Image (cartoon, rainbow, N blue to C red):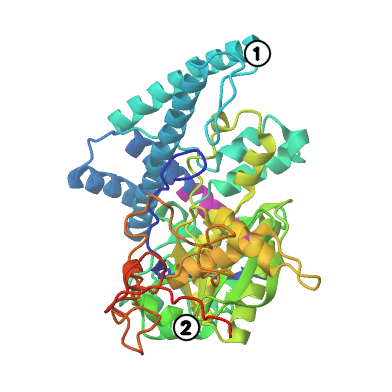
Amino acid sequence: MNEAGKPFRPIRDPFVVQEATGVAIRDRLKDLTPQDEKILRLTGAHLGSLAAADLALYSRAGFERTNRSWATRKQDLTAQSSSRWAGSLTKGTHDQYALARRGQFAYRDKLADGVRMLMHRLSLPVGEKGAKGNPGGYRSQGEWFHKSRRLHILKTRLAAVENDIAAGRVHVVRGGKRLARNRHNLAAAGLTETGWRESWEAARWFLSADGESGKRFGNETIRVTPDGEVSIKLPKPLEYLANAPRGRFVLSARVAFGYRGAEWADRIAHHRAVAYEIHLDVLKGRWYLTASWKRPAIQVIPLQAARAGGLIGVDTNADHFAAYRLDAHGNPVGNPHRFTYDLTGSADHRDAQLRHALSQLLRWATRIGVRAIAVEDLDFSDGKTRENFGRKKRFRQLIHGMPTGKVKARLVNMAAEHGLAVVAVDAAYTSKWGTEHWKTPLTSSKRAMTRHDAAGIAIGRRALGYPIRRRTAPPRHHQSDGDGHRTVQADRGTPGREGLRRTRHGTTPQRAATGHAVTAGNQRAQHRSGHVAEHESWQQDSLPLSS
């Protein structure tokens, strides 16, 4: 039971995370001529219009989707592009629909949580204080009134989402909802109308082609040769602009992948599938080519092998990683390490900060020789709705600021490149119990401990299979516990607390070597006043007479 009288929830077992099988690398398309850029813009705009029309048709179809309807859509797209472009367009539509569908279910769950919390708080008297972990009533009648209005709004939104889910409809903004909203707030977004229009059009282009194993260099639509030559298959309405046989256009730019270049070269040399995507960064005015492919799934190492030699427990926070090294027995080694990052600013800046912090963490793990990193299996989906915390805006911002999704994606892939396994543990009570059992004992004049550092130790111990709390303290100055119950001692109501404490081999830890293990816990077999000894009665001798 916790302090509020509620039972602790079951703790899930730790597990080794399966690394991602997808690989993506990118290089800049330099020295493009005006004709090259014109061809790319025309091709992207034409295919983008086809992708938008196909997505709208597919989204409105509901559940009336069959192989025959897919074949009909592909035939219509082939007449306006090519068979391979049509295959990429339909696959992109299916992927976009699946992503929107998952977001739709997540949005429904978020609205349901908000409605449930509002109904609970509105049912309480105004001004009633909440218990620990449960919010109370609203502070004033005015706040109660505004929240009751919000309840009706959320119920309306929830009903609309549930109707869309039942009908199989999704609502997708090609180009991104955020960019679409920026059109009405150009000054706040720091954009001009011309700049926004260019970004909006570039975001709606389609220049992505799936790879094909067995075809020349792994892709017939966007082809990249071993020497870096890039050529694209033009759609049928644009074939008159081709500068190479069979309706192809060869760009003047050359690419050379510095990262994973050898792996990419090996794939195209054996004509294995490689997908390519061309996109324009409007703010920088640069074109990029991204290559991606799938690797065969690698079987994860056993959990016991990952634990051998110890590991590093990592606590994820809004502005830093708190890491602590633990040996194979769960003992903290050395001092805590903190790897900071700044998640303010643009998305590129945030991503770069996160990658830099993870790189420092992984380099440190490789240097000290551990084989695994333990992290929390975080999921704050139940805590992100503002109805759960009322006016606690700073706490909501803290929860939103934790880059849990990016950490999972980045850490697993980057750790695999360093030969490190990632062990995920249940996040329940790690911060609370880590602070309770480890913060004070490890704090000294030369070591500053925070609750996040203590949480890192708790995460590491849970990943190693040990309890978070420390070992039992040695006995007091006498065995009647005059100073109170010892650490980790069972409570009075615990069944069997007075029984014999057996070791792993079935013997008691004391007197096992002398053969008295059987009577070690028998209070009546000890030489104590009022009890019978093991083999004979006992009584105190009379006092000797003085001479």
Mark with earlier residue (1, 2): 1
Give the left or right position of residue 217, taking residue 410 as reference.
left
| Residues drawn in magenta | 33-47
**Secondary structure beneath label 1:** loop
Q: Confirm whether residue 174 shows in the render.
A: yes
Q: Report the residue marked by disc 1.
A: 140
Evaluate whether residue 34 shows in this view.
no
Mark 2, secondary structure of its residue: helix
Quadrant where the N terminus sits is: top left
Is 503 positioned to the left or the right of 486 in the image? left
The CA distance from mark 1 to mark 2 is 64 Å
Q: Which mark is residue 263?
A: 2
Q: Nearer the viewer, residue 196 or 144?
A: 144
Residue at 55% from the left image edge and 42% from the top image edge: 176
Where residue 136 sits, quadrant-wise, is top right
**Mark 2 residue type:** Glu
Magenta run includes residue 507: no
152 in relation to 358, above or below: above
Q: Position of residue 144 (x, y in %)?
A: 59, 13
Please say whether residue 35 is one of the residues in the magenta stretch.
yes
Q: Nearer the viewer, residue 129 or 541?
A: 541
Question: Is 288 rendered above or below residue 427?
Answer: below
